Every structure is written in C-alpha cells, then in structure tokens.
Image: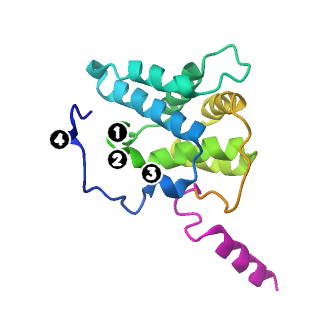
Amino acid sequence: MPKDSDEFCDHRVPNDKEMLMSDAGLDQHERTILCVARYFFISFAEPFTQAWAQGITAAEDLPVGGSDVQPVALVLNVVHAMRSSRMSCFQFNCPVCPVCSEILSEQERQLMGTITALREGRSGTAHTHAMLLCEGNDTNEFLQSVQKLVEILPRFERVGCPRTLRPIGLLDAPVSDHLKLRHDWKN
C-alpha cells in the first residue's frame, strides 16, 4: 500500500478486462463497499498492514438499514464467502491510490456486478457474475452473503443508461446493440 504521494501511480490505464470506475455506473454506496472490500483484500494479502482497520473506518459511510449486523461485518462476510469458493488469486486495486482506486480489476468487476445485479433484482445476472467470480464453484454462501449486504442498501433506481457491469466476455457490446441485434434477429 503506498505510504506517500511519491508511490502513487500516475500512468496506469485499464487493461482489456478492467474498467474505469466512471464507466461502471456505481453509486456512492457501491463505491464504499468496494473501498471497504479492498482494505480487507489488503489485510489478507499483507496482514502486517492491518488495513482492516481502515476498512472499518471507510464502512462508516454505509447505511445500517435496520440490520442488527454492522455493514462492515456484512462486507467482510461477502469477502470471506468469495475467498472460500475461489481457488486462484483475486486481483484488486489499491483503495488509497488516486489512479488505481478508479479502476476495477476483472475480479472486482465481477464482485460489483453481483452486488449491483442483486440490488436491481436481476438474480440471473447476479448468478452469472457469481459463477465467473467463484470459478464455477459453489456460489450459495457467497450469494447469500451478498443478499444480506444488499438488503441494507436502498434499492438502486436506474436513471438514464443501463449500468455496464456485465459479465466479461458474454456481452461486450453496449446493451442497446444487443437488444437491436436480438430484435433484428426476430424479424
């Protein structure tokens, strides 16, 4: 984790499987969840950093939503359930770097895709993201933990364009292009 401004990236751009945060359409609650999760990822990758403490502080911006469980615990449960089902490393970006924190890795994109899809009531899309993220392993515990987290958030109301956190490789063109192709195919 960078310690001062000299260690920040100033040249990084997303690769083919990454996405700029500004293109993802995440709202402030989802951005906060990702930030908290990133601190937990750092804690698991480099325990000596004790970055989990910063994750607790970052989670103070999340709504409690009538839950008896603190939002930070719900995010940790999501991270733990995901880690339990994956076999390979999870690539994530640094939450304190002003450049890297604005990029979603491929795995972060799948994680946030699961959260946003469940939040919007699109369970099929959420299952697809979860299957990809969990590498074909059991997704039940992961999806249950995401559902509990989503329940404390206000329902996302779509305004304007559809959000773009689609499973990588399945739908690479804009949604409107797919609808047009599907419509043309039917005629």
Q: Which residue lies furthest to the bottom in this view?
A: 187
Image vertical order of residue 157 relative to residue 185, above or below: above
Q: How packed is label 4: few (under 14 Cα within 10 Å), some, or many (20 or more)?
A: few
The residues bearing labels 4 and 2 have C-alpha atoms spaced at a distance of 14 Å
> For numbered disc 1, what is the local secondary structure?
loop
Q: Name the residue under label 3.
A: 106
Observer-side mark, 2 or 3, equals: 2
Residue 25 is marked as none
- Which residue is pictured at 35% across the width and 30% down the height? 42
Q: Mark 4 points at which residue?
A: 6
Choose the circle earlier in sequence order: 3 or 4: 4
The residues bearing labels 1 and 4 have C-alpha atoms spaced at a distance of 15 Å
Q: Which quarter of the rendered picture does the C terminus lie within?
A: bottom right
> Which region is colored magenta?
165-187
Residue 76 seen: no
- The one nearer the camera, 13 or 89, is 13
Q: How packed is label 3: few (under 14 Cα within 10 Å), some, or many (20 or more)?
A: many
- The one nearer the camera, 167 or 74, is 74
Residue 186 sits inside the magenta stretch? yes
Kindly indicate whether the residue at mark 1 contacts the one at mark 2 (C-beta within 8 angstroms): yes
Amino acid at dot 2? Cys
Image vertical order of residue 34 relative to residue 161, above or below: above
Left or right placement of residue 162 versus residue 88 in this view: right
Left or right placement of residue 50 versus residue 40 in this view: left
Observer-side mark, 3 or 4, equals: 4
Residue 18's x, y, as percent?
A: 42, 56
Q: Mark 1 points at which residue?
A: 94
Residue 67's x, y, as percent?
A: 71, 18
